[in-house]
Each structure stands twice: as structure tokens, then as C-alpha cells.
Image: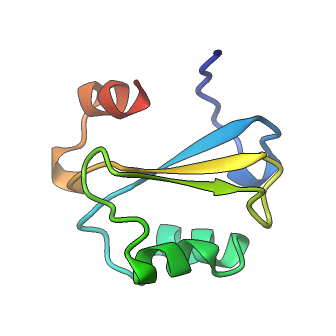
Amino acid sequence: MRIEFRSVKYTEVACDMLAYPVFEDEPKNSPSRMWLDKVTRGVFGGALASGEFKPELHHTCRIHRPAGLKADRLLLIGAGKKSQFSLARLREIGA
């Protein structure tokens, strides 16, 4: 397994699995949530609405062949509260 951090557009990353952190206290109409729902053609919003994914710390949801992305799979990762996010938390959820 090889883990990389890249500062590029998510839609342009071709890989086996792309991780996307989601904060539990982020509003449903936040730009990042709305963008991800638009890119995945509603799959992200559907996973939230159905309860399949809860953005609480360490909760995950794997989406196979996500529409709008070049990645084979999209891994949604609950990143906890945004105010408590740090480099240590990023390393923790990345592991």
C-alpha cells in the first residue's frame, strides 16, 4: 500500500482509493459538501441521508466507482469536529 498526499483537484486524481475527510459539525449546505454531492451526482448526499455514512470521528464509507471522479473508489472518513482538527488528527484518520 502506498499513501500519498497531493494538493490537486480531487476530480483529477486517478488512483485505487481516494480518501475524503468529512467534518461532523460542517453544515449540510457547506461548499465542500455541496461540491462533493454534485461531483458524485448525489451519491454523497444519499449516503448521508440514508445513514450509511455518519461523519463522526473514524466512521467510514466506501463508494465504488464514484461518478465524477477518476478514482476507482472513494473513502469518506469522519474527521470529527472541525475545531478539533490538527495535523495529529490528520495522521490519525489517515492511518
Q: Measured from the top left, where is residue 94 in percent x and y?
A: 42, 29
How is the rendered protein coloured?
rainbow
- Specify whether residue 9 is in view: no
Q: Nearer the viewer, residue 60 or 31?
A: 60
Is residue 82 left or right of 29 when viewed as pictured?
A: left
Residue 51: which quarter of the image? bottom left
Which residue: 65% across, 16% down? 2
- Specify whether residue 75 is in view: yes
Q: Nearer the viewer, residue 57 or 83?
A: 57
- Location of the N terminus (image quadrant): top right
Q: Measured from the top left, where is residue 75 in percent x and y?
A: 55, 48
Q: Measured from the top left, where is residue 17 in percent x and y?
A: 67, 39
- Location of the C terminus (image quadrant): top left
Residue 25: which quarter of the image? bottom left
Is residue 91 left or right of 35 when viewed as pictured?
A: left
Instruction: Tell how many labels.
Output: 0
Which residue: 62% across, 75% down? 43
> Residue 37, relative to residue 71: is it above or below?
below
Q: Nearer the viewer, residue 78 or 27?
A: 78
> Residue 63, relative to residue 9: is it above or below?
below
Give the farthest residue toward the top. Answer: 1
> Residue 25, relative to residue 94: is it above or below?
below
Is residue 77 left or right of 23 when viewed as pictured?
A: right
Q: Nearer the viewer, residue 18 or 90?
A: 18
> Residue 93, relative to residue 68: is it above or below?
above
Which residue: 74% across, 61% down? 66
Q: Measured from the top left, where is residue 61 in percent x and y?
A: 48, 55
Which residue: 78% across, 46% down? 72
Residue 68: which quarter of the image? bottom right
Is residue 44 left or right of 67 when viewed as pictured?
A: left
Give the farthest residue toward the left. Answer: 84
